[in-house]
Image (cartoon, rainbow, N blue to C red):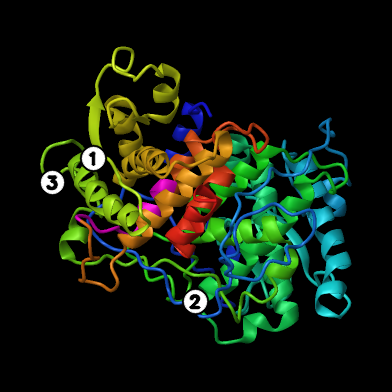
């Protein structure tokens, strides 16, 4: 559960990766995705309608595809994932030149072995799964996979138009699948995004990206890319496909490919780096979705396997609205000022949580004590007898004084890195512990922590504006575009390092339960608490 400062720095400085299905033109247009500036507590983000309830199945880690009906609220918190292999296997697969068209002058890269092993397994996996899932034989990539680098003089096909792809074309996109020619290309240059991501995070993050690109190749075989559907739906399904492959690799079923808890988390980081900028309409051509939505699609595949991904074009997962709610919200990039003075983020959170939760408990026959946020400047002195908890979580519920103790210095660091709803997530989750106490929750340990994430998600969802310019009822603040992404990024650095640590919930599990609360609402969170 320890906060991991290096991960904070990685997320805060993540490079953009413009991986996508390339538009068939003579040149490549970079997707509208970039590392985000902070954003949050004074605007809007709203879930789109989801009449079929697709994608709101509660997060559990099954040993086989889940048979739970979509949209059914969970009555128990998820059991832990199945046991991992006891040893980490070394990378062992075909040489890169047997899997990739390496051209005539490819420099050796430190990630070549890992990438070739992953690409080989992804293709083997689809050859097995495609007939079972779609009823037809899998047709391998007709054009193959190309490594692009400045020294290369042998041709890489163009994606439409009359000419070949230049190195700059591929570098601008990072990695892409082209339906014209049925090929994948990636930037293998030393200054390119694949090299930089592999050097910064490790090569597994690029394997997840390639699994996503193969998802677009699958869509081409199904005719999906010829349909008139929003880009974000195809991106969502490709994220789901990559999550299903990641689960296979994490289960130790990808021969010769080590894939650990850390690699699963890196898959989430990849999706954070390629989220849409705030203020961008996700349904516009080229939209990819927020980090919250993209991680949700990845988790759908990871938790529920390929069958859950197959129907996402016609029954997409819910999406969060990403446009600013008004001019003032756009002017401050969706951020409230850090501090506890009137109108600043700590004050807004204090007033909002004190307004929202008492009414919810009263409706359930319980009484919420009057809590307050107490900013702490010296956690070694004021920590409610839990210095470790405050140091790791940065905000804790103190039952003896009905306070939320908030580490000002640590919270300010995450505010500066991610935005004001880093503070909202920390304080909201600590407040949710007070809510559980008021309900007499029987949950302990990791289950209790994940229930707090669910409650935090339910509170966030209720603070989303019903439509632009309309304030949500019974709230002092309004959720801004980017707030949920800031919560996700904070969960990534605050959660347990591994899926099996079972202390307070891993980043992967925390995001899953945060989504459960956002998408399914308070009843889904209260069921296990009131059982």
Q: Residue at x 27, y 65 (%)?
A: 324
Residue projecting furthest to the front: 365
State left or right for residue 281 relative to residue 228.
left
Q: Which residue is mark 1?
A: 370
Give the extent of the magenta segment. Answer: 476-487
Is mark 2 in CB contact (under 8 Å) with mark 1? no
Q: Which residue is mark 2?
A: 50
Disc 1 versus disc 3: distance between alpha carbons?
20 Å
Q: Residue at x 51, y 79 (%)?
A: 230
In terms of image quadrants, where is residue 344? top left
Disc 2 versus disc 1: distance between alpha carbons?
36 Å
Q: Which residue is mark 3?
A: 343
Is mark 1 in CB contact (under 8 Å) with mark 3? no
Q: Nearer the viewer, residue 57 or 237?
A: 57
Disc 3 versus disc 2: distance between alpha carbons?
34 Å
* Mark 3 neighbour density, 10 Å: few (under 14) some (14–19) many (20 or more): some
Is mark 3 in CB contact (under 8 Å) with mark 2? no
Q: Nearer the viewer, residue 44 or 502?
A: 502
């Amino acid at each position: 559960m320890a906060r991991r400062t290096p991960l904070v720095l990685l997320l805060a400085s993540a490079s953009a990766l413009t991986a996508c299905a390339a538009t068939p033109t003579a040149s490549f247009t970079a997707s509208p995705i970039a590392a985000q500036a902070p954003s949050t507590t004074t605007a809007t983000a709203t879930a789109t309608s989801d009449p079929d309830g697709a994608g709101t199945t509660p997060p559990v880690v099954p040993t086989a595809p889940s048979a739970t009906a979509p949209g059914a609220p969970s009555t128990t918190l998820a059991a832990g994932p199945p046991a991992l292999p006891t040893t980490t296997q070394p990378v062992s697969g075909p040489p890169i030149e047997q899997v990739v068209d390496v051209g005539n002058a490819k420099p050796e890269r430190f990630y070549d072995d890992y990438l070739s092993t992953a690409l080989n397994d992804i293709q083997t996996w689809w050859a097995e799964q495609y007939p079972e899932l779609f009823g037809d034989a899998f047709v391998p990539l007709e054009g193959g996979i190309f490594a692009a680098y400045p020294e290369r003089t042998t041709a890489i096909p163009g994606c439409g138009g009359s000419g070949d792809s230049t190195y700059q074309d591929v570098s601008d996109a990072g990695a892409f699948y082209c339906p014209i020619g049925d090929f994948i290309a990636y930037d293998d240059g030393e200054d390119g995004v694949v090299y930089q991501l592999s050097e910064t995070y490790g090569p597994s993050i690029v394997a997840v990206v390639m699994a996503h690109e193969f998802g677009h190749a699958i869509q081409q075989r199904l005719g999906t890319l010829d349909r008139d559907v929003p880009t974000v739906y195809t991106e969502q399904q490709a994220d789901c496909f990559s999550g299903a492959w990641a689960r296979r690799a994490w289960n130790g079923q990808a021969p010769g490919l080590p894939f650990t808890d850390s690699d699963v988390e890196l898959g989430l980081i990849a999706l954070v780096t390629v989220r849409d900028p705030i203020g961008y309409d996700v349904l516009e051509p080229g939209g990819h979705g927020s980090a919250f939505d993209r991680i949700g699609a990845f988790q759908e595949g990871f938790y529920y396997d390929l069958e859950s991904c197959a129907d996402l074009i016609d029954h997409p997962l819910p999406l969060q609205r990403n446009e600013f709610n008004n001019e003032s919200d756009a002017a401050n990039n969706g951020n409230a000022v850090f501090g506890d003075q009137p109108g600043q983020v700590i004050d807004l959170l204090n007033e909002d949580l004190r307004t929202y939760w008492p009414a919810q408990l009263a409706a359930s026959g319980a009484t919420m004590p009057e809590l307050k946020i107490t900013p702490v400047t010296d956690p070694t002195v004021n920590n409610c007898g839990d210095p470790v908890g405050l140091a790791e979580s940065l905000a804790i519920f103190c039952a003896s004084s009905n306070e939320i103790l908030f580490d000002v210095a640590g919270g300010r660091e995450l505010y500066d890195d991610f935005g004001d709803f880093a503070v909202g997530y920390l304080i909201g989750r600590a407040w949710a512990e007070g809510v559980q106490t008021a309900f007499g929750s029987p949950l302990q340990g990791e289950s209790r922590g994940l229930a707090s994430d669910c409650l935090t998600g339910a509170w966030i969802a209720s603070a989303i504006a019903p439509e632009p310019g309309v304030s949500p009822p019974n709230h002092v603040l309004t959720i801004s575009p980017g707030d949920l992404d800031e919560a996700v990024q904070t969960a990534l650095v605050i959660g347990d390092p591994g899926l099996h640590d079972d202390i307070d919930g891993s980043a992967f599990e925390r995001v899953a339960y945060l989504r459960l609360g956002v998408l399914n609402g308070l009843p889904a969170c209260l069921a296990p608490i009131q059982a």
